[in-house]
Image (tube, grey):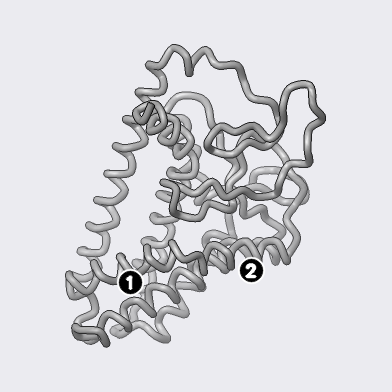
Amino acid sequence: MLIRDRWQRVSLCTLILIGTIGFAHTLRAQDPQQSSAPATNQTGTNAAGNSGTVEGQPASEPKPTQNDRIFWALPNYLTVENQSNLPPLTTRQKFKTVAEGCFDPIESVFIGIQAGIDQADNVNPTYGQGFVGYSKRYGTAYADAIIGNFGTGAIFPTLLHQDPRYYQMGRGRFLHRFVYAAGRVLITRSETTHRIEFNFSELLGNSMAAGLANTYHPGPHTIVSSANVLGTQCLMDAAGYELKEFWPDIHRFLKRVKH
């Protein structure tokens, strides 16, 4: 029952996400000014559309990562816009960037909300209710996020020489971009040859998180429960890639609404 309820919550969040980005992308396509806008140059730009250079001035060195926060809140460090290839991140940069995301104050609040929802649904009843039960749910949720993020974004990308950054497509039909973003769970770039290869970092990083979760999550611990944790982590990562891809479209739409 708990497994089914967890998948239902993840599926609902995913459907809401799909509807939001599809609506924003449709409105953007209907905007004649946006569709006729000139292409941006090859230097890095943030998701708000602020170019890193001014025409007629020398281009500055593109940053290896950016942090145009999704919905002005969620950290978004490992995202690249309007760049095809960038120098590989150093080991220090990978760990530093993942740590900044994991220990960002907004990330703490987001996990706190997730723990509150789990407590309201009485997920893992052995934790109980009250402050003690909430603390256990918050601690395990935070541990899941830290282990998963470091595994997929720093540890295995370093060992396997894979690029943990997400390269936005930024243009094209909605379905094409949607499939591209979701597919990053399965494929990624080599940081040395820039070729597309299977995303072992995603699989191994989340498998490590699922395996270690058995040491602090309440039982019973089975292959099915571990596979459920792994699938949930991969599905949430896919939803995160969709946000990274379509947040600039949503941002532009919200700006037009505001003005």
Of marks 2 and 1, which one's residue comes earlier in the chain? 2
54 or 221, which is in the foreground? Answer: 54
Q: Secondary structure at mark 1?
A: helix
Residue at (34, 69) in percent of width and height: 112
Residue 6 image point, x, y percent = 26, 64
Residue 135 image point, x, y percent = 32, 82
Residue 95 image point, x, y percent = 65, 67
Q: Is residue 190 left or right of residue 112?
A: right
Image quarter where the N terminus lies is bottom left
Residue at (59, 63) in percent of width and height: 98
The dot on residue 155 is: 2
Image quarter where the C terminus lies is top left
Residue at (38, 78) in percent of width and height: 140
Q: CA distance from mark 2 to mark 1?
A: 25 Å
10 or 34, which is in the foreground? Answer: 34
The dot on residue 224 is: 1
The dot on residue 243 is: none
Quadrant assignment, res 91: bottom right
**Which amino acid type is marked by label 1?**
Val
Residue at (52, 50) in percent of width and height: 186
**Which amino acid type is marked by label 2?**
Ile
Mark 2 packing: few (<14 Cα in 10 Å), some, or many (20+)? Answer: many
